[in-house]
């Protein structure tokens, strides 16, 4: 297949968005798109390019005092009758338009057209963000190519609808287990119903009042919710076990350990088993490039309500922000789309920040 990322396309972030969307790259199937991205980046004279799996890294080495990373994932969720892209008025529809090929288009456009930025730049076009973290291209790069992630500041081009979203929430999943004793339902008094016991777990969740935390002017709303409940043996058996799966989204002033301790406190007296956890990221607004970026955007930042890969940068001591043209409310939706105006505004903002 001929590379659709032609010179005429690379200079126009709107056409570039469409070209990226029209190369199917569902998670674990990013090779064709990574091949195209690598090919055009290797044709530039101002970038050095390396590849790890289906993650492509390109960087300038101009001797600037500071280095900035622009990162975006190449993969999408599975197609949902929304491929290839279509255009209706000022909207581009298609899988990945919002999350996050319009953001990738901004980074790739700059990589191809900005040979002399004010900072040294590292571009990371990475694989497998939408699935289990063991496949995540940033995680794999941090393990085997840590020098790729060395920088003073990073921008993750996730969908934010053109607003800077600072940091991110941490996330924790756990199961709360209740136990009982099996019995025939005709002689239910001989048993102890574990599903009935789970009612207390649900009551505590219903009564729970989450924190609202403001950090560096950004307000994070925590949450603790039941997301799945399981129990039962048969239609005539008093169950001896029930499990309530809970998910906590916690503000970045809590560590993972502190978040788990809080969950254990909420469900004191019950068996709690941690199944998954990821740290949050503080807003990262103090770095000089971050302040200058906020000036270029011209609007106050908001808290990122959700988890993103900025947490991976934060874990390495690199302040990072989320910024992209897509609307996060449309991510993964069958009618996913992006506004053409937001793409052009995002490209102009990044160029104003990095070229002036």
Image: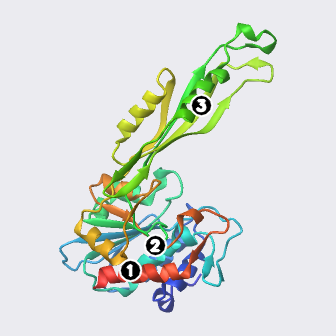
Q: On the picture, is 100 further left or further right than 334? A: left
| Disc 3 element | helix
**Residue 227 image point, x, y percent:** 60, 41
Badge 2 is on which residue?
162
**Residue 169 image point, x, y percent:** 42, 51
Q: How is the image coloured?
A: rainbow
Q: From the viewer's perspective, is residue 238 above or below residue 303?
A: above
Residue 334, numbered circle: none
| Disc 2 element | loop
Q: Are marks 2 and 3 in contact (CB under 8 Å)?
A: no
Q: Residue at x 41, y 33 (%)?
A: 262
Badge 3 is on which residue?
202
**Residue 228 image point, x, y percent:** 62, 38
Viewer-closest of 229 and 61: 229
Q: Are marks 1 and 2 in contact (CB under 8 Å)?
A: yes
Q: Residue at x 42, y 81 (%)?
A: 347
Badge 1 is on which residue?
349
Q: On the picture, is 95 further left or further right than 301? A: right
Q: Determine crowd level at label 3: few under 14, some 14-19, many 20+ residues with C-alpha closer than 10 A.
A: some
Which circle, 1 or 3, is nearer the viewer? 3
Q: From the viewer's perspective, is residue 235 above or below residue 255?
A: above
Tell me the CA gap for discs 1 and 3.
Answer: 47 Å
| Image quadrant in which the N terminus is located | bottom right
């Amino acid at each position: 297949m001929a590379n659709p990322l032609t010179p005429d396309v690379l200079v126009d972030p709107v056409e570039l968005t469409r070209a990226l969307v029209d190369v199917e790259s569902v998670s674990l199937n990013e090779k064709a798109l990574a091949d195209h991205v690598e090919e055009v980046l290797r044709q530039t004279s101002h970038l050095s390019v390396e590849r790890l799996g289906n993650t492509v890294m390109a960087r300038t080495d101009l001797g600037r005092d500071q280095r900035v990373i622009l990162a975006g994932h190449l993969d999408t969720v599975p197609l949902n009758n929304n491929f290839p892209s279509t255009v209706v008025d000022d909207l581009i529809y298609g899988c990945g338009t919002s999350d996050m090929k319009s953001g990738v288009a901004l980074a790739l456009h700059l990589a191809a057209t900005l040979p002399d930025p004010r900072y040294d730049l590292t571009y990371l076009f990475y694989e497998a963000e939408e699935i289990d973290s063991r496949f995540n291209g940033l995680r794999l790069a941090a393990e085997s190519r840590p020098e790729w992630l060395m920088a003073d500041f990073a921008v993750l081009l996730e969908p934010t609808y053109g607003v800077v979203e600072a940091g991110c929430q941490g996330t924790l999943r756990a199961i709360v287990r209740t136990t009982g004793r099996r019995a025939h339902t005709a002689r239910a008094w001989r048993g102890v119903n574990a599903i009935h016991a789970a009612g207390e777990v649900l009551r505590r969740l219903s009564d729970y009042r989450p924190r609202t935390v403001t950090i560096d002017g950004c307000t994070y709303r925590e949450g603790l919710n039941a997301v799945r409940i399981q129990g039962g043996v048969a239609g005539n058996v008093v169950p001896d076990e029930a499990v309530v799966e809970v998910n906590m989204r916690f503000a970045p002033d809590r560590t993972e350990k502190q978040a788990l301790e809080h969950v254990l406190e909420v469900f004191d007296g019950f068996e709690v088993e941690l199944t998954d956890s990821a740290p949050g990221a503080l807003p990262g607004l103090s770095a000089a490039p971050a302040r200058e970026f906020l000036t270029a955007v011209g609007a106050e930042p908001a808290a990122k309500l959700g988890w993103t890969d900025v947490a991976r940068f934060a874990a390495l001591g690199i302040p990072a922000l989320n910024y992209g043209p897509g609307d996060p409310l449309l991510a993964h939706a069958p009618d996913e789309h992006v506004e053409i105006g937001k793409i052009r505004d995002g490209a102009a903002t990044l160029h104003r920040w990095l070229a002036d």
